[in-house]
Image (cartoon, grey):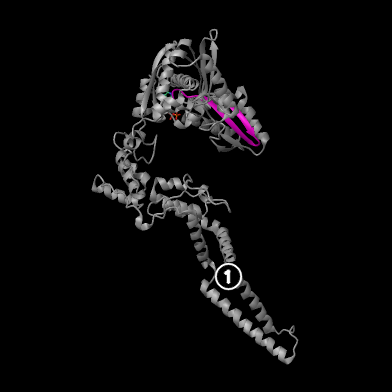
Amino acid sequence: MDVRRRSEEAVYSSKVFAADEKPLKPHKQQQEEDNTLLIDASDALPLPLYFTNGLFFTMFFSVMYFLLSRWREKIRNSTPLHVVTLSELGAIVSLIASVIYLLGFFGIGFVQTFVARGNNDSWDEEDENDEQFILEEDSRRGPCAAATTLGCAVPTPPAKHIAPIVPQQPAVSIAEKPAPLVTPAASEEDEEIIKSVVQGKIPSYSLESKLGDCKRAASIRKEVLQRITGKSLEGLPLDGFNYESILGQCCEMTIGYVQIPVGIAGPLLLNGREYSVPMATTEGCLVASTNRGCKAIYASGGATSILLRDGMTRAPCVRFGTAKRAAELKFFVEDPINFETLANVFNQSSRFARLQRIQCAIAGKNLHMRFVCSTGDAMGMNMVSKGVQNVLDYLQNEYTDMDVIGISANFCSDKKPAAVNWIEGRGKSVVCEAIITEEVVKKILKTEVAALVELNMLKNLTGSALAGALGGFNAHASNIVSAVYIATGQDPAQNIESSHCITMMEAVNDGKDLHISVTMPSIEVGTVGGGTQLASQSACLNLLGVKGANREAPGSNARLLATIVAGSVLAGELSLMSAISAGHLVNSHMKYNRSTKDVTKASS
Ligand code: ADP
């Protein structure tokens, strides 16, 4: 749809992506060129412009000459001027026509407006051609251009009269354009394949299936990309990764992998067991800070983590002819008598999927049904989707007038901030607590219990309330959630709802010690499926003792992982809040984030 709505600017922008075509121009220069284009576009007139102009000039002067000579004759013969013959009438009409044309032409704006309107009006007809052009360009250029087509990288066409913000790029003339980067291919055969992909004869996405060798496909695709864009990908490693293991599951169109350092925080003493928590991050100080929090928890006797709920959700939307019919289905679905039937249908999707409830919301004639189910050790999105499809098929037989709008319609709600997850929970809901002794607060955290309690009230509760936070009543839960998710192969995009957290602090034991808790209603984790089966992520899960499926008690690995996530967040909250209350935050960041090393040299 985005493609259809794009104007010619968008088509032009899509060209900008390729190195072998003109770069984005500065705005003023672009406008001048556009004006030229508009004048040229007057070729849309039935005859060439110079010919049309000549015709109207000749007509104007000859008609003028004719009329003047007729008037001179009338004056001589004393004939009244308003008595007009048929030939004079024709001449007057021709004169008016030529005057209108010539006035219009010399007021260039008139011609431009005319042509510009003509272009706009005819855009819809040309749209199909533009679309075809974009698609052809994309198939030739591979992944970057594909992103452009989807609208990911294309600036929206500017509104009329508002100057668009165009990224200022140095204008590079064709002569100055860098030569395409060419790295010798591993073999002559590979060189031939590279050339064919560059020329668009072999689609880049088909390399894996054509070659039957995923690493070779990635290597060829990487080289193709370098040649097309002229940009070096030298720092992006290719070796040392099993590309077969991600085929059809984790990533497509591979050209290498990104390296993220993994640090270790711990031991985290949680429910009487010790865990070393792997954290993948490039934020200096984060692991060190979480590690300090773990130390404080350990020294205070450990933390306790309790799982409150476990249910992944998916919410399709169905539509009826009337709101009354939508309401009828809502009552049917929510009636406990029908639940068993629906659960049987749902549970056939997997040995591990178990429907818990269906929560309905109506918007006019539309019914959104939020299915909640346990999914064993899987995070469960695929599993729950299959179950929902089973139920929709079943309901379709009973409600033939039901129109299924979409299997996922945002009442779920996946990877978006939404109150429904914050209030109802999604995935695993966990509360985790610890009592940190006065001594530990002073010696390890270098602050005071009262200072922490006050800061928590004013920052995590009051400040967040003023900010209109949705589940963001914490200091930095998402820092820890993201780092653990990346290390253990979770879906990092689910960090959005998984980081919902309210951190509470209270002085206990006559005000001497600190009670701290984190409550996290929607931690979405799994230990099977997705990225969890990849070698390095699997090693991190193994370190935590939650690798793969738990055969004795399916689901307990994923549930344990959720409690560890909450425990790690507790450690992170404790340490950062202490640093802020003690005024150490800036100093420690300067120490860990701004090392005295010459960063530019380090990166090269
Ligand atoms: P997700 O739903 O998280 O995307 P998938 O459904 O793709 O995950 O992967 C889960 C797969 O693992 C299913 O095929 C399921 O049958 C299998 N599986 C094996 N053991 C378990 C377990 N203990 N818990 C959940 N799924 C399991």
Residue 467: tell me if it is visible.
yes
Indicate whether residue 360 is drawn in magenta: yes
Judge whether 107 appears above or below 160 on screen: below
Q: How many marks?
A: 1
Camera-side residue: 599 or 191? 599
Check the image and name the residue furthest to the bottom. 77
Indicate whether residue 343 is drawn in magenta: no
Please state which amino acid type lies under the numbered disc 1.
Answer: Phe
Q: List x then y, in percent, for residue 390.
A: 52, 31
The quadrant of the image that shows the C terminus is top left
Which residue is at 57% across, 80% downward? 58
Q: List x then y, in percent, for residue 200.
A: 36, 52
Camera-side residue: 54 or 350? 54
Check the image and name the residue furthest to the top. 510
SS label for mark 1: helix
Q: Which residues are magenta?
A: 359-378
Q: List x then y, in percent, for residue 62.
A: 60, 83
Q: Residues within 10 Å of mark 1 (few under 14, many from 20)?
A: few
Q: Main secondary structure of the magenta part?
A: strand
Which residue is at 53% across, 17% downward? 451
Judge whether 454 appears above or below 202 on screen: above
Disc 1 within 8 angstroms of ligand 1 (CB): no
Residue 284: tell me if it is visible.
no
Image side of residue 223 versus residue 550, left or right: left
Which residue position holds label 1? 106
Give residue 335's quadrant in the image: top right
Give residue 453's quadrant in the image: top right
Image side of residue 467 versus residue 476, left or right: right
